[in-house]
Image: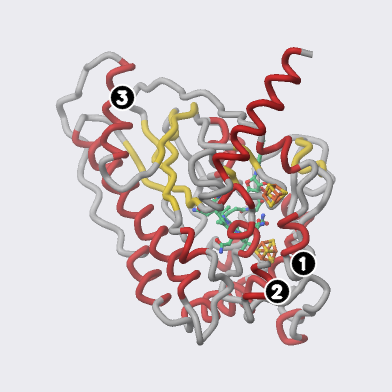
Amino acid sequence: MADQLNPRRPLRGNYSPKPEISALLKVSGNPINGLGETTRRRPSPFFWHPPDKHPYGELQIVARQSSRKCPGAASAFQAAYEYPELIPVAAQRNESPTDQLAAEAKTFALSHEADDVGIAPMDPLYVFEGYTINEPWVIVLALAHNYERLRQVPSDETNGIGVSDVGDQYARGTRASYALANWIRSQGYNANPYPGPMAGALLLIPPAIAAGLGELGKHGSLISRHFGSGVRLAGVTTDMPLLPTTPDCFGADEFCKTCQVCTRACPPGAIAEEKQMVRGIERWYVDFDKCIPYFAEAASCGICIAECPWTRPQVRPKLLATMARRLSQTSVE
Ligand code: B12
Ligand code: SF4
Ligand code: SF4
């Protein structure tokens, strides 16, 4: 098993946070996330927002330092923060029909580093409290990880390959989202990019699910039929008239109900076995208070997305076939 092969990975139950890290977790993150709340509301600004917007500024600094000290990671993340200039919106509009504009935007994204692309109407519930997004459409881009690199997480001073791949994919997300925003601007419409690694105004997983890029997994990340959980997201909001893409339910949510790979692999045991009520929606949930100390100590961790069976290129096609069979049987019954 990967757990035993990877000397940097403590087994579940063998990890306890360093006291100096625990001391920095002064407020529980789960009430901020709305755990147990039955009414729908926008997400509160949280980790990876400016430190004056949340109570985890010091933990954020520790987390950043712990990833950057790994070989190769500092330059990989640096590239993710190299934001190109945004060009002014052209005076002349591309007045092509909506379906053609949507097709052109997708083609542009796919030829500028995006590995998958989807479109969803903007929903205020995607926007963090205290921020405003005026554009009516969100285009979500998927950037696939290199599995052989990702599976080497967690990283440390002896091996920075996994976290460097995280930085590399964020850098692709920055380039891809800025390129698409600039292309849309060149067509006479407004557009704004939302790349990682900082959170920005836009929560990315819900619009990605609505746009058909995948399903929410038990580990709290999106699972794509093409890349499993080994995928980063970036967004572009725009007033270019577009058409939505449809959600993609290929059986990941159903599979998670009986799979326990991530719950067992997560060293602090942060991944809940059952769905929880969070801001008015019953869904998979990760306990922030348990995840964040290990995340901060272990160079952004990432074990859950690397270990998910859907992420393994040899396993994914078999799971897709099994779940397609299972879903078709359920729909017949
Ligand atoms: C803050 C943040 C974190 C925080 C807190 C996460 C948390 N869940 O509490 C920390 C630092 C712990 C973290 C860790 C990780 N993160 Co993070 N994180 C973010 C960030 C910047 C904002 C998300 C946030 O504020 N969450 C806090 C609240 C809002 O969380 P929540 O209510 O539980 O909602 C989460 C999900 O349940 C879902 N969700 C929310 N509302 C709804 C509604 C519906 C209907 C559904 C179905 C789902 C859903 O989306 C939220 C994503 O965390 C996003 C980027 C972005 N702008 O969205 C990346 C992001 C979610 N992280 C990502 C990843 C991959 C990770 C890690 C694996 C680390 C790593 N090495 O890459 C771990 C996984 C931990 C985990 N299991 O959640 C990716 C996920 C990609 C994917 N395949 O889905 C994102 C999208 C970054 C990116 N640009 O690609 N992260
Ligand atoms: S990122 Fe968090 S939830 Fe995922 S395995 Fe690491 S500690 Fe667990
Ligand atoms: S490891 Fe298993 S339970 Fe966890 S997200 Fe992947 S499929 Fe779902």
Say few, some or many: other residues with alpha carbon within 10 Å of mark 3 (under 14 / 14 to 19 / 20 or more): few
Q: Earlier in the sequence, mark 3 or mark 1?
A: 3
Q: Are marks 2 and 1 in contact (CB under 8 Å)?
A: yes
Quadrant housing the C terminus: top right
Left or right of 142, for residue 64: right
Left or right of 252, for residue 156: left
- Give the amino acid type for the residue marked by disc 2 in the picture: Pro
Q: CA distance from mark 3 to mark 1?
A: 43 Å
Give the residue number, with chain letter if any, for mark 3. Answer: 103
Q: Give me the residue at 70% from left, 74% from top.
A: 293
The one nearer the camera, 194 or 243, is 243
Left or right of 320, for residue 41: right
- Report the mark closest to the observer, 2 or 3: 3
Give the residue number, with chain letter if any, for mark 1. Answer: 290
Q: Is residue 26 above or below residue 126?
A: below
- Give residue 246's position: percent from left, percent from top: 52, 23
Give the residue number, with chain letter if any, for mark 2. Answer: 293
The one nearer the camera, 190 or 300, is 300
Snapshot quadrant of residue 241: top left
Snapshot quadrant of residue 276: top right
- Give the amino acid type for the residue marked by disc 3 in the picture: Ala
- Give the amino acid type for the residue marked by disc 1 in the picture: Lys
